Amino acid sequence: MFDSLSDRLSGVFDRLRGRGALNEADVRAAMREVRIALLEADVSLPVVREFVDKATERAVGQQVLKSVTPGQQVVKIVNDALVEMLGAEASDLDLDVSPPAVVMMVGLQGSGKTTTTAKIAKRLAGKDRKKVMMASLDVARPAAQEQLAVLGRQADVATLPIVAGQQPVDIARRALQAAKLQGFDVLMLDTAGRLHVDQALMEEMKAVADVATPQEILLVVDALTGQDAVNVAKNFSDQVPLTGVVLTRLDGDARGGAALSMRAVTGKPIKFAGVGEALDKIEAFHPERIAGRILGMGDVVGLVERAAETIQQDEAEALAKKMAKGQFDLNDLRNQLQQMQRMGGLGALASMMPGMKKLAGVAERAQDDKTLGRLDAIITSMTPRERAKPELMNAKRKIRVANGSGTTVQDVNRLLKMHQEMANAMKKIRKMGGLGKLAAMFGG
Ligand code: GDP
């Protein structure tokens, strides 16, 4: 078994612990381990180099989040860069042409091409309610056409009747005509494979593509073959205009590095992943799963994501301390309102406290009513003394503030009432032994 990247990095983590921003030397130290992990995951060397450079550039200078180590943060940065490189954008089949849309499947023998043809056909027929026909152009391997017919019956998808002795380009022509005449939406062409890439195969692919003008040309590759798969992909993509890649056998213990190389080498999106032998074992490609497999540390990624969320909690914590000292005045209320505008704020804090539903309710109402701007204007129109001591607000002052803020005395009263409710709620927090509890909640 491979050491997971997290094991490898732990040494680096220890050295990096507790610094403010990621400096270049630290990042390079961590990236050395990332580099080894990528190579072990079967990512090809040029791709590793390019990737590490990019990730390093991105990581240097980033502020380290509280409660994670710099090394963990580097892993998250690496993870995000992996997902991006694998193609974060959704990439389904593009079959938006006048029917029949032709999908041509190419790949080496044994890659899972025929099975994948049937899987995609079944998926299109089922989920997408398309009328699908399959045709095998594989005249090189004995019984290949028969195999597709059997799979067609299993998947409940039509197949082109077999005519013995016909050559691939002629079969493609006949399939296209049949699909047109019989009103099929999609025609799937399963082409011949070879044990190795050879020129005759490439010529055949090109000839078929010329006749069938496929909307999609999908290269099927076996994820388990690692570097070989990448070479195959390079050969095919140099000669045939691929539109996407299907990685099979991701149910096995492929470390996923091939996916990354594949994407880099072909520049084409990975559209599907084969995850088993059965015909429903195909799924849309999930870059984040592959990234997790390569890094072997989904836990760290989640951890860093949570740490980013706690930045917001830090602000809440500062407020909690003030509240506990009974110092919540209108300035604090204004800060809270501004924070709420950004998100969460007091409402989020309050909803975490037992018995603080009411406080959360007040905060939420302010948000719902879209009165935040008005409340802010009212507080701005008050004098500093009034903000610090709201009880100074008599009838005369209220009229002055209402005029100054372009609101009404009722609006001013509503604001003062809201502040009063919050201040009361905070007294309750104090009675509950608030500060200790709050501090514990935020990790001291
Ligand atoms: P072809 O020669 O490229 O057409 O390959 P086949 O479609 O005949 O597949 C070869 C073998 O791989 C068959 O036994 C398939 O069941 C199996 N296979 C195909 N895709 C997958 C996959 O995603 N996972 C697993 N475990 N097996 C697969």
Image (tube, rainbow, N blue to C red):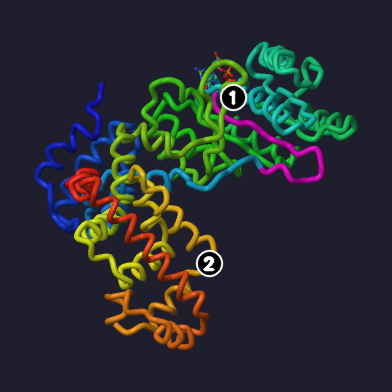
Q: Earlier in the sequence, mark 2 or mark 1?
A: 1
Local SS, label 2: loop
At x 42%, y 87%, the residue is 396
Q: Mark 1: is the Cβ under 8 angstroms from ligand 1? A: yes
Q: Give the x, y percent position of residue 125.
A: 74, 28
At x 81%, y 40%, the residue is 99
The answer to which of 179 and 423 lies nearer the viewer is 423
Against 32, residue 118 (above or below) is above
User: What's the residue type where badge 1 is placed?
Assistant: Lys
**Left or right placement of residue 104 versus residue 3 in this view:** right
At x 77%, y 32%, the residue is 130
Res 31 visible: no
Local SS, label 1: helix
Crowding around mark 2 (Cα neighbors within 10 Å: few <14, some 14 to 19, many 20+) is few
Q: Report which quarter residue 23 is drawn in.
A: bottom left
The answer to which of 319 and 121 lies nearer the viewer is 319
Inspect the magenta stretch and tell me whether residue 107 lies in it.
yes
Q: Which residue is mark 1?
A: 113
User: What's the residue type where badge 2 is placed?
Assistant: Lys
Task: Look at the image and give the residue range highlighted in magenta.
Answer: 94-108
Inspect the magenta stretch and tell me whether residue 343 lies in it.
no
Query: Which disc, if any, is residue 370?
Result: 2
Q: Give the x, y percent position of residue 81.
A: 37, 48
